[in-house]
Image: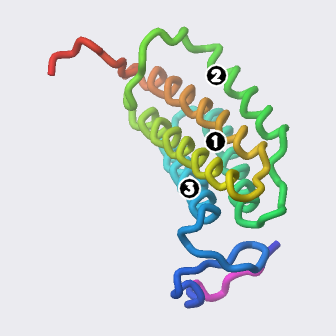
Amino acid sequence: MGNRLSKIYTRTGDDGTTGLGDGSRTQKDSLRVEAYGTVYELNSTLGMLIATIEDEGIAEILLDVQHDLFDLGGELCMPELSLIKDDHTSRIESELDKLNAALPPLKDFILPGGSLSAAQAHLARTICRRAERRVISLARQEPVNDVVIHYLNRLSDLLFVIARTAARASGAGEVLWDHDRKR
């Protein structure tokens, strides 16, 4: 376990750098910091989703994901560390398959919305896709555990299915894209 902060500000970042988990310093806008920062943003968004979701089973799945994302962010913050394994992705796939089995086949494009929880799940999904893009950009320049990319890819799919599930559970239903809608 790392050092505990007794003082929140250190002034060490006032020069535009931040410390990585291995003790090295890097620019705050580096690809690595952007990648794990977006993962932390995703984690915060999941916290908002958990606060609104009514399905306790889904809330528990998302809490597990939050723990995974904390590890994933730590892995990105500490080069050479490997915390996310294939088992993490397999667990996401299993939950995804269970939730998706209860949904009707998708025949139309879905707009973000339907209920507050569904909209927050869609927002989390788009942030997850951004995190995935940031990690891919980082992986082009520095070594990154491939499983991190697989996990984020699958997580975005899970969040889409959670959005569909939440919209239907709310009674509001999914908001379908209408190509012929009058403008």
- Spot occupied by residue 107 in the image (x, y as percentages of width and height): 47, 9
Could you tell me which residue is drawn at 61 percent across and 88 percent down?
7
**What's the mark number on residue 40?**
none
- Give me the C-alpha separation between circle 2 and circle 3: 26 Å
- Give me the C-alpha separation between circle 1 and circle 2: 13 Å
Q: Which secondary structure, mark 3? A: helix
What amino acid does circle 1 point to? Leu
Q: In this orientation, does residue 39 appear?
A: yes
To which quarter of the image does residue 155 belong? top right
**What's the mark number on residue 38?**
3
Could you tell me which residue is drawn at 56 percent across and 87 percent down?
9
Q: Is residue 95 above or below residue 35?
A: above
Q: Residues within 10 Å of mark 3 (few under 14, many from 20)?
A: many
Q: Is residue 24 above or below residue 129?
A: below
Taking depth in this image into account, of 130 and 166 the one nearest to the observer is: 130
For the C terminus, which image quadrant?
top left
What amino acid does circle 3 point to? Thr
**What's the mark number on residue 99?**
2
Q: Is residue 108 above or below residue 116?
A: above
Start-end of magenta stretch:
3-8
Q: Earlier in the sequence, mark 2 or mark 3?
A: 3
Q: Residues within 10 Å of mark 1 (few under 14, many from 20)?
A: many
To which quarter of the image does residue 154 belong? top right
Marks 2, 3: nearer the viewer: 3
Taking depth in this image into account, of 154 and 158 the one nearest to the observer is: 154
The residue that disc 1 covers is: 62
Q: Earlier in the sequence, mark 3 or mark 1?
A: 3
- Spot occupied by residue 65 in the image (x, y as percentages of width and height): 68, 45
